Amino acid sequence: MLLSLIMTMVPGLRTPGSGNAGQAYGAAASSTAVLVLFYMARTLRLQRDETSLQRQELELQRAEMRLQRTELELQRDEMRRSAGELHRSAEAGLRRLHMDLLKMSIADPELAEVWPKFAPDLTVKENRQYLYANLIYCHTMLAHKLEMANDREALGHLRYIVTSPAFRGYWESARFMRAEMDPDSHESHFATLVDEALTQTNGQAPHAPNLRLIEGQHTEQ
């Protein structure tokens, strides 16, 4: 109202020859409305800019959270891989110890007597051969377990191994031991490969050995 009163005092706002103060008040009100609209528009623009900045900040926060989730997933995957490698390393060490024990029993007949015979009627010579066959089996299975050979490569090597009568005798005498295996275990799966190799070699010519498996070399990628 103060602005309107001031504007009524401005001569330029008065109509020439007219003393009607209402026209002056009308002009002042129009000017005031224009100013109000200007400030309202400016305020709305500032609010819109602030809202846009808030949206951008939220997007940045979401992007940062996505990066953090991705990093956590990578860390979990790395921990799982490390745990798997440690488990395989520990298992390989345990199997090597088992093979060392077998070697000792093969080299020393007195130690061989500590191991129960694979069959009651085996001679000392046959029992030592079966112990050695078990050593070959453990070596080949460990190579497969450590992914030094896939199923196809292991099966090809097993077709050579099972042509040995001593190995066949060992495998048949140890059948009762395999009955206690966990069907979902790697050893059970590998035993299935041995059985398949036996089936494939019945009545066929001997197969050549896989020298890479014997020497313990990794599969070339």
Image (spheres, rainbow, N blue to C red):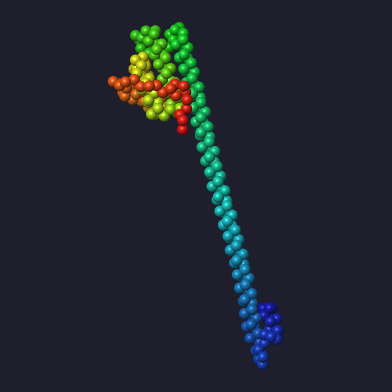
The one nearer the camera, 156 or 44, is 156
Quadrant containing the N terminus in the rendered view: bottom right
Question: Which residue: 44% across, 11% down?
Answer: 106
* Drawn side of residue 123 relative to residue 1, left or right: left
Judged left or right of residue 32, residue 160 is left
- Identified at 55% across, 42% down, the residue is 71
Where is residue 15? Give x, y as percent.
Answer: 65, 89
Image quadrant in which you'd find residue 168: top left
Task: Pick the residue in front: 75 or 196.
Answer: 196
Q: Residue furthest left?
A: 203
Front residue (pair 12, 156):
156
From the viewer's side, name the closer residue of 119 and 13. Answer: 119
Residue 167, image quadrant: top left
**Residue 11: which quarter of the image?**
bottom right
One can see residue 176 in this view: no
> In this image, 14 relative to 132: left or right?
right
Give the number of callouts: 0
Q: Position of residue 205 (x, y in %)?
A: 31, 20
The residue located at (41%, 14%) in the rendering is 131
Q: Is residue 38 above or below residue 141?
A: below
Residue 149: give x, y in percent of width and height: 43, 27
Q: Position of residue 214 (x, y in %)?
A: 44, 21
The answer to whether residue 20 shows anywhere in this view is yes
In-image side of 5 versus 167 (left or right): right
